[in-house]
Image (cartoon, coloured by chain):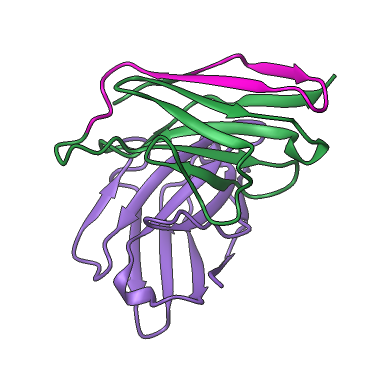
Amino acid sequence: DIVMTQSPLSLPVTLGQSASISCRSNQSLVYSDGSTYLNWFQQRPGQSPRRLIYKVSNRDSGVPDRFSGSGSGSDFTLKISRVEADDIGVYYCMQGSQWPLTFGGGTKVEIK
Amino acid sequence: QVQLVESGGGVVQPGKSLRLSCGASGFTFSTYGMHWVRQAPGKGPEWVGVISYDGSKKIFADSVKGRFNISRDNSKNTVYLQMDSLRAEDTAVYYCAKDQTWNWGQGTLVIVSS
């Protein structure tokens, strides 16, 4: 199975500042079709997860452009620019390139 | 808009069975695969399994293989998760999710306890 490792575990941020979350896989996520199936999800307190980013850097509909994804191969980053109070929650990466699908352990974003 | 509503959760004894349902609306259900994902209290999500759009293909996580099964009824826009031989470690909120766009339902809580 592909192991997804996120860091940091906890990320205290100041409102208006930027935040970056790292996600690394123990093998390349490049699929045979050339695409890299790396997703980012946000889970606000008491809510279901919501996908923000798919295939490394594509924002889902309705996701503010303050959220951006980057990376390649086995090293990926989610950046939140100008953090707002609404952004608090836990962020997970998930790979969809190989069965079984696997999630990272999560990064809790909280306000300083 | 896509809506997914899970039901069927509850408290069940170890070794018993439970069937969860997920009703879908807002999209052409019969053309999408459907996933089940679970989340134990205070933990991250764990993918459980997937069923193809027509039910012909199913893939499961090793942790549930041989004990859980996924089925669907496209005439009812519903996907099911049959859980047998339940263990304490199966305690979690169970979500269904639409393939490709990864819309999630609100989840249903399963507690396995004597």
Q: Is residue A28 left or right of residue B106?
A: left
State the residue in front, A18 or A24.
Answer: A18
Tell me residue A22's x, y (percent): 51, 18
At x 82%, y 21%, the residue is A14
Q: Quadrant of residue B64?
A: top left
From where the camera sits, is residue A13 visible?
Answer: yes
Q: Residue at x 26, y 49 (%)?
A: B59
* Residue B26 to residue B34: above or below: below
Whole-percent x, y for residue B39 in the image: 57, 40
The colour one sees for chain A in the rendered image is: green
Tell me if residue B11 can be seen.
no
The residue stretch that appears in magenta = A6-30
Residue farthest toward the bottom in the current orientation of the protein = B75
- Asked if the stretch drawn in magenta spans residue A24, the answer is yes
Q: Based on the displayed image, in which of its 4 quarters is residue B70 positioned?
A: bottom left
Q: Residue at x 30, y 45 (%)?
A: B60
| A103 shown above or below A13 | below
Q: Nearer the viewer, residue B86 or B70?
A: B70
Q: How many marks?
A: 0
Q: Which chain is purple?
A: B
Q: What quarter of the picture does the C terminus of chain B occupy?
A: top right
Residue A3 higher or lower than B90, as above or below: above
Q: Horizontal and vertical percent for residue B46?
A: 47, 37
Quarter occupied by the N terminus of chain B: bottom right
